[in-house]
Every structure is written in structure tokens, then in C-alpha cells.
């Protein structure tokens, strides 16, 4: 019987006792707060958010300026501290205090949970409207020159709720009580341009025309000659959206719900795909085009039809569009909207945008926008890392690898020094970011 000697071949033996104590002085586990603050200052995000909200507090009794409150809340969300309660533990963190503009040693601690609750419940409809417009304004700031075209991906997603919030409803498809936010992204760059909270029983397309009309108006005021294409799934296949796009001169490509008439149009192509699959025993896909008029349409519209034959059976898919081009090119253009699902995952999974636990509907809309601005902050950070291995990763990966770095903080008369982990593997990425941010920070390797 073979004997296992655990000490065989081992020449290293630890002879010293290991001791653990939380007595390392003024330290932080989130040194990346200072990077987020520099990205924020580059685009003026927190200052712009604060300017959109009317501060109704009596100036004689203000301890925390509104700009500091916005910065603290958005930075916390970006760093994975999505709950207001987290501020009770983070308000004395030296990195977060430095990020919002306070000295880590001399100045008072930051705001706590009750202050943020009052902030969220103090917004009104006019504040929300200005914040919606700010999403598009921030989008313009990051574009150095007018684009040739913009693809707007619009989609609905569910936010599960677990309390008695206003305007929540049970949704049979999702199987629980929800809100149904409506989101609009730049489909090629990933910028968030719209985030509207809706009640839980809203149709997927509810409010889509109103939201898109505001975005299209602002874009055309800024770039009159840009081509705008609307891309959406079958939940937005409603005549009102088609008519809006055709009236405004917008391109669109939208999924259609399958019905008997569409299957009949696609019958010959599907039969051909099945025949080829039987001959080759490999998956076959054919894409063709035609014209179709539903009963509620005033005229026929172009449709793109897909027919697939594969081991699992057959699959058909239909799109409606007013764009020119071959059916295959347009089908490829539509399938690229799958990237919008990744943008939604960044917003919901990494930044916890479904944490809408206020009782009133309007504060929850404000919360959704705060998470949306945290998305813009992280998206800008990832954009600055273009060309590196971190330039395309998910937000939670970016946060874990780049921002979650521990270190010690020292404050002197003239400077605040962060002595970060010596073995941190992404020091070169910090160096690159500091250069691209304009060398406001000094990195000593």
C-alpha cells in the first residue's frame, strides 16, 4: 500500500506565528475610488447631475454639499456598494473621502444613509426630466466628431421588487412582481441614452415613441446629417413605432411575431433548407426578403425571412424594415443587437440597477438614473482602456481587476499620498489611465 508523506520534497517550513489585527492605520480596500473621481471630472458628470436637481435645503444647515452627495452615491454604486446603507460603513473611507473632494484626515466624514434617503425622496418631475436630457448630453461629450450613423437599440427589462412599491404589478411571464424599465443604448458603442421606469404591467413598447422622439430631436439638433436606425425585438412590433420612424425619416429593423401568413411566405425557402439539411446533414440557414401587409398596416412593408434546418428541427424568424440592402446583410445587422443584452447585464448584474426599493415611484426612477450614471462612469473608464485587455471586459471584471486595490493613505500639508499594494498586477493600466486623464494624478512606480 502506497504511503503519502506530506513533507517529502518540502524544504520550506514556516517557523513564525501568524498574527492578524485591524491596526494598519488609515487604509482602504478600494483605491480605485480616486480613478473613478478623475474620470468623473474629465466628463463633468457629478457636477452636471447636481445642477439638474433643485436643492431645497436651507443653506444654513447644510453639512454635505449636493455635488458631494451625488459623487459619493454614484461612486459607491460603481464600486459595487449599491445600497444606501453601505454609506454608513464607507463614510470614513479615506479613498472615498478623497474622491469626493474632502481630506481623509482633517475633514468630517461623508453622508450616511438617512441623508441619501432624503435626497432620493426630494426629487420632482422637473428634476427627472433634466436628468433624462443629461444622458444624451453626456453622450455628445464623448464624441469628438459627428458620426455617420447611430443605431439606437431599445429594449425592455424586468426589475424584480420585494416590497410594496408604488405601481408594481405581477408579471405572468417573469413570475413575480416587477417594474419594467425601458432602456436605449447606442448599439455600436454601448452608451446609455435613455432609462425610463415603467409600471409592472406595461406593454414592452409603452413609451417607446415618446422616449425615442426626445433622443432623436436632441441628436438631430446636434448632428443634422446623421443617419439614425432604430433596432428592437418583436416586443416593439407595433404600427405606431413604424409610422413614427417613417414620418421622421428614420431607418428601422424590428423583429416580427411569427404568424400563419408569414410562415406561408417563407414556406418555399424552409422546404429548400430542409432538403439541403437532409443531403448534407449539417445546419442550413437561408435568408430571403419579401413584402407583407398586416391587417393593421396601411400599406405593405418589407420583411426579412430566415429559414433554418438543424438537428433540433426547423426555425423561422421574421423582421420588418425600411432599410435598403441584401436580406443577409440586414439580418446580420439585426442579430448584432444581441450586444445590447450585454449592456443590460452590465447595468443590472454588475451595477445592481434592479435595487429599486423606495416606496414611491418617482424616487425609484431617480435611483434607476443614478445607476445609469454609474454605468456611464464605468463605461467611460472602459473606453479609456481601449486597446488593452481590459478594454472589453464586463464591469464586474473591470472593477475586480482594476479598482479593488488596497493601500495606505497618508495626508501631509501639500499632498495626499496613496501607497497601494506593491504586487498589484495592473499597475501599467493605472499608468495608462493617468496619462489619458491628463496626468492630474502622479503615479510613482
Image (cartoon, grey):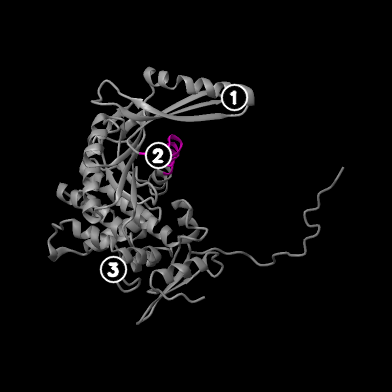
Viewer-side label of 3, 2: 2
| Mark before the other along the chain sequence, 3 or 2 | 3
Q: Does residue 35 lie above or below 357 as drawn? A: below
Image quadrant of residue 293?
top left
Residue for point 22% across, 41% down = 248
Q: Position of residue 192 (x, y in %)?
A: 33, 49
Disc 3 crowd rating (10 Å Cα; few below 14, some 14-19, many 20+) is some
Q: Position of residue 213 (x, y in %)?
A: 22, 43
Q: Which residues are magenta?
A: 324-339
Q: Does residue 285 lie above or below 19 as drawn? A: above
Residue 277: give its label.
Answer: 1
Type of secondary structure dominating the magenta stretch: helix
Secondary structure under badge 3? loop
Q: Quadrant of the N terminus?
A: top right
- Furthest-bottom residue in view? 413
Viewer can see residue 208: no
Residue for point 29% across, 42% down = 357
Q: What residue does disc 3 label?
A: 108
Image quadrant of residue 71?
bottom left
Q: What residue does disc 2 label?
A: 325
Q: Nearer the viewer, residue 382 or 201?
A: 382
Query: With 271 as the anchor, is 187 left or right in this view?
Result: left
Q: Position of residue 173 (x, y in %)?
A: 37, 27
| Mark before the other along the chain sequence, 3 or 1 | 3
Amino acid at each position: 500500500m502506497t504511503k503519502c508523506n506530506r513533507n517529502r520534497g518540502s524544504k520550506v517550513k514556516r517557523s513564525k506565528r501568524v498574527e492578524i489585527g485591524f491596526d494598519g492605520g488609515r487604509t482602504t480596500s478600494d483605491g480605485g475610488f480616486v480613478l473613478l473621481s478623475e474620470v468623473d471630472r474629465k466628463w463633468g458628470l457629478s457636477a452636471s447631475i447636481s445642477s439638474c436637481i433643485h436643492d431645497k435645503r436651507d443653506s444654513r444647515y447644510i453639512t454635505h454639499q449636493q455635488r458631494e452627495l451625488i459623487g459619493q452615491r454614484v461612486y459607491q454604486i460603481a464600486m459595487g456598494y449599491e445600497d444606501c446603507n453601505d454609506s454608513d460603513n464607507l463614510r470614513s473611507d479615506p479613498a472615498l473621502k478623497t474622491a469626493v473632494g474632502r481630506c481623509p484626515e482633517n475633514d468630517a466624514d461623508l453622508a450616511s444613509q438617512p441623508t441619501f434617503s432624503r435626497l432620493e425622496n426630494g426629487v420632482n418631475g422637473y428634476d427627472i426630466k433634466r436628468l433624462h436630457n443629461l444622458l444624451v448630453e453626456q453622450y455628445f461629450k464623448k464624441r469628438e466628431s459627428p458620426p455617420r450613423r447611430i443605431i439606437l437599440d431599445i429594449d425592455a427589462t424586468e426589475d424584480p421588487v420585494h416590497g410594496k412599491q408604488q405601481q408594481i404589478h405581477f408579471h405572468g411571464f417573469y413570475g413575480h412582481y416587477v417594474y419594467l424599465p425601458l432602456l436605449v443604448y447606442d448599439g455600436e458603442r454601448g452608451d446609455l441614452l435613455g432609462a425610463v421606469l415603467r409600471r409592472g404591467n406595461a406593454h414592452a413598447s409603452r413609451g417607446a415613441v415618446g422616449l425615442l422622439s426626445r433622443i432623436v430631436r436632441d441628436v438631430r439638433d446636434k448632428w443634422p446629417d446623421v443617419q439614425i436606425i432604430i433596432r428592437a425585438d418583436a416586443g416593439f412590433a407595433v404600427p405606431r413605432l413604424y409610422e413614427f420612424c417613417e414620418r421622421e425619416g428614420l431607418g428601422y429593423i424590428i423583429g416580427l411575431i411569427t404568424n400563419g401568413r408569414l410562415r406561408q411566405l417563407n414556406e418555399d425557402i424552409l422546404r429548400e433548407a430542409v432538403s439541403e439539411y437532409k443531403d448534407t446533414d449539417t445546419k442550413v440557414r437561408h435568408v430571403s426578403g419579401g413584402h407583407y401587409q398586416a391587417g393593421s398596416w396601411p400599406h405593405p412593408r418589407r420583411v426579412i425571412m430566415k429559414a433554418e434546418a438543424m438537428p433540433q428541427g426547423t426555425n423561422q424568424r421574421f423582421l420588418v424594415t425600411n432599410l435598403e440592402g441584401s436580406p443577409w446583410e440586414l439580418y446580420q445587422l439585426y442579430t448584432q443587437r444581441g450586444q445590447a443584452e450585454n449592456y443590460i447585464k452590465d447595468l443590472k448584474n454588475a451595477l445592481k440597477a434592479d435595487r429599486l426599493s423606495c416606496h414611491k415611484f418617482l424616487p425609484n426612477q431617480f435611483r434607476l438614473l443614478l445607476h445609469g450614471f454609474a454605468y456611464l462612469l464605468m463605461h467611460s473608464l472602459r473606453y479609456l482602456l481601449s486597446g488593452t485587455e481590459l478594454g472589453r471586459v464586463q464591469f464586474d471584471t473591470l472593477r475586480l481587476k482594476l479598482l479593488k486595490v488596497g493601500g495606505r493613505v497618508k495626508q501631509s500639508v501639500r499632498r495626499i499620498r496613496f501607497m497601494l499594494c506593491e504586487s498589484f498586477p495592473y499597475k501599467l493600466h493605472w499608468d495608462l489611465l493617468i496619462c489619458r486623464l491628463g496626468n492630474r494624478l502622479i503615479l510613482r512606480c
